[in-house]
Image (cartoon, rainbow, N blue to C red):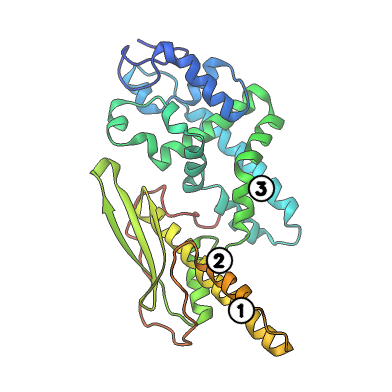
Amino acid sequence: MSDANSPSRGRGTGSGPAPQDAASSHTLLEGRLGYRLETALLVRALTHRSYAYENGGLPTNERLEFLGDSVLGLVVTDTLYRIHPDLPEGQLAKLRAAVVNSRALAEVGRGLDLGSFIRLGRGEEGTGGRDKASILADTLEAVIGAVYLDQGLDAAAELVHRLFDPLIEKSSNLGAGLDWKTSLQELTATEGLGVPEYLVTETGPDHEKTFTAAARVGGVEYGTGTGRSKKEAEQQAAESAWRAIHGAAEARAKAAEAERTGKPASPAKAAKQQDKAVKANGTAAPAATGTASAREPAVDGDTDPAGGGAQPAAQ
């Protein structure tokens, strides 16, 4: 039986690096994190409960996950408090929820290729566990907890800033709902375009499905997105559509201002702005019609607890 210090494939059950590969595997991950950690602590952070149970009840990463969640929340909350000195508590809570959620953490984990280092049981391995948002998010929090224990708060905070500051900046571009679907619905209502609809298709086997969503407003497709869950694909499609419609609206506003002041914008510059606005999805955004659609908002049908983009605001 393997112990917490010796990840293995072939002794016990489940999947993890073979003994001869464990050291190089950990070194690779540590290089991406920017810190060398105590071996036993890193192994613990990478041990999912499915692997632990299949190997005689080894220690899991759940306590480290609990600790890392608190460290992550503290650093992100402190950052938001300092960079948004005028925002009320409720809005700060929404911003934090847009950054600290399973979908966002999973994307950061994928950027580190964290899934390839996790020790998983056979059942999770066989159902695509290495790319499950919930597992990636939990493991990333466990790794943050391990960095905190081994290197201290300053090191853990530096890691959180390096991994999450881009998300913090991105969240400032979103609307009151702090997710792209809500922001798109607010924008299309403002522009008089109607309510967005999402057409979703799926491909691949049940344990490794890929979803593709198209965001349509008033019968016009403005953006597409793909993801491991329906909600993730819809969020990406909503972001693409939001950027296209928002960019086109900005171009129209600038043209109107130029006409009002008697300084018309260069046609070439206006065309460039329009092209930039719709570059993501390649579909020209038509002018606002001024007529709202009678369609009801799309209802999320995906029950994946980790999908769905930004989580609801903190209560």
Q: Residue at x 42, y 29 (%)?
A: 116
Q: Is residue 315 visible?
A: no
- According to the image, label 3 marks what residue? 77
Q: Label 1: few (<14), some or many (≥20) within 10 Å?
A: few
Q: CA distance from mark 1 to mark 3?
A: 45 Å
Instruction: Name the amino acid, label 1.
Output: Pro
Nearer the N terminus, badge 1 or badge 3?
Answer: 3
Q: How many marks?
A: 3
What label sits on residue 276 in the rendered view? Answer: 2
Nearer the N terminus, badge 2 or badge 1?
Answer: 1
Q: Residue at x 48, y 33 (%)?
A: 139
Give the x, y percent position of residue 43.
Answer: 49, 20
Image height of 1 relative to 47, above or below: above
Is 252 displayed left or right of 287 in the figure? right
Q: CA distance from mark 3 to mark 2?
A: 34 Å
Is 157 displayed left or right of 293 in the figure? right
Give the x, y percent position of residue 277.
Answer: 54, 68
Image height of 259 relative to 308, above or below: below
What label sits on residue 73 in the rendered view? Answer: none
Nearer the N terminus, badge 3 or badge 2?
Answer: 3
